Amino acid sequence: MKIQVLVICLLLITLPIAATKYAGEIFAISPGVLSSAMGSTGLTYDSSFSVGWWNPALLGLISDNGIELMRSEHFEGLMEQNQMSVILGSTTKTSLTLNNLCIDNVKLTKLENPDDSLSSDNRPYVWKTISNQDFIFYAGLARQVSNSLYLGISPKLAYRSLAENSGYAFGADIGMLWQMNKRARLGLNLRDFFSTQVLWEGGENETVIPNLDLELGYAFSVKAKIPVHLAVRSEILLENREATVETGDFSADFHAGLAVQPIPNLRLLAGYDVDCFTTGIGVSYKSFGLNYAFRNGSEDDLGYSQRISATYQW
C-alpha cells in the first residue's frame, strides 16, 4: 500500500503546467546492449552497465566496478550511437554514462531557380551538407532505504546541435526498485521528474513532459543450474502520442524480455520491443566481455538496428 501511495503522489506532483510534446526525444534512445537485446527491458536487470539510465536504483545491488564501450547503428546505419558507461565506488556505487547520437552528411537541396517549379530545366542541387549531434551525460546514484527497497536518482545534461541550431538540456530521473521476494522485482523510473528543460540559443525554451516506466522482473533457475530472467515493461507517456495504447492525455507502449545463462560465460537474450523483435548474445572471459544486440525494423521503421559493446570488470 505504501508503494502505491508513493507512485500516485510522484505522478501528481510531476504533471507539468505547460510542456512541449516530443521535446524529450533527445533522451529516448537508450544506452547499453544487454537491455536492448531484451526488448528494451532493464529496470529490474542488474547485469547491465547502463543501469544509471534504465533504473539508477539498481546501483544498490551492484558489487563490481566496470566499464562498457558501445557502438551502435540505427536504421541501417542512418544514425550512429557511441556510448561509454562506468560504474565506480566501494560501498556506494556511482554510474557515469556519456551517450552520443550522430547523423552525418545530411544533404540539403534547393532548386536552381527557387521562384520556378521543379522541371527538367530546373532541377534540385545539393547546396549544403550538415550534421546533427547529441551529447548526453548521465550520473546515477542509489541508496538502500530498507531491506527490500532501493531508491536512485540520475541527473542528466545534454547538448544538441541540429543543423544551424543548438541548445542545452538539463533534468533528472528518479528510480525505485522493490525486491518483492527472492524471485520477483518491481522497477520504476520517473523520467524527467523535475520537468526537464531544453534551452535553445535562439531564446526558445521547451519543457519535457515527465513519463513513467514500470517493469516487473522475475528470476528463476531451470534445473537449479541455468539462471533465467523474465521482464515485462510498460512505458507510460503523459502525453497523447501514437502508441500501442492511446487514451486521452495518456499513451503507453509495452516491452518484454528474456535472458538465459546456460553456462557462466554465456548469455542468450531475446525480447519484443513495441512492434519489433530483438535478440542478442553476451560472452565473457575472466574480466572481459563482448555483447551484441539486434533489433529488426517494423513496417513503420527505417530499418534494422544493431549494437556491440566491450566490457571490463574489476
Image (cartoon, rainbow, N blue to C red):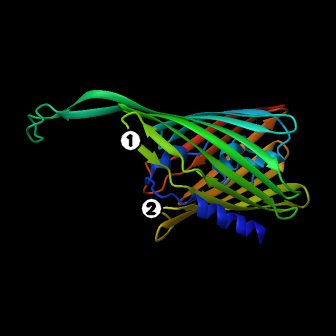
Residue that sits furthest to the top in the current view: 128
* Left or right: 113 in relation to 218: left
Q: Would you place residue 208 above or below residue 252 in this image?
A: above
Query: Do we see residue 104 in this rendering?
Result: no
Could you tell me which quadrant the N terminus lies in?
Answer: bottom right
* Left or right: 245 in relation to 88: left
Q: Which amino acid, by three-letter code, is at mark 2? A: Arg
User: Residue 198, how many percent across, how many down?
Assistant: 47, 42
Residue at the location (51% across, 47% down)?
304
Query: Do we see residue 228 in this rendering?
Result: yes
Could you tell me which quadrant the C terminus lies in?
Answer: top right
User: Residue 153, how many percent across, how many down?
Assistant: 70, 46
Residue 179: image quadrant is: bottom right
Residue 225: mark: none
Nearest to the observer: residue 156 or residue 242? 156
Q: Which residue is mark 2?
A: 241
Name the secondary structure under disc 1: loop
Residue at the location (50% across, 44% down)?
197
User: Residue 49, how many percent across, how many down?
Assistant: 72, 40
Whether residues under marks 1 and 2 lie with C-beta atoms below 8 angstroms apart, the answer is no
Q: Which residue is mark 1?
A: 204
Q: Which amino acid, by three-letter code, is at mark 1? A: Glu
| Count of numbered marks | 2
Distance between mark 1 and mark 2 Cα atoms: 23 Å
Residue at the location (44% across, 46% down)?
206
Name the secondary structure under disc 2: loop
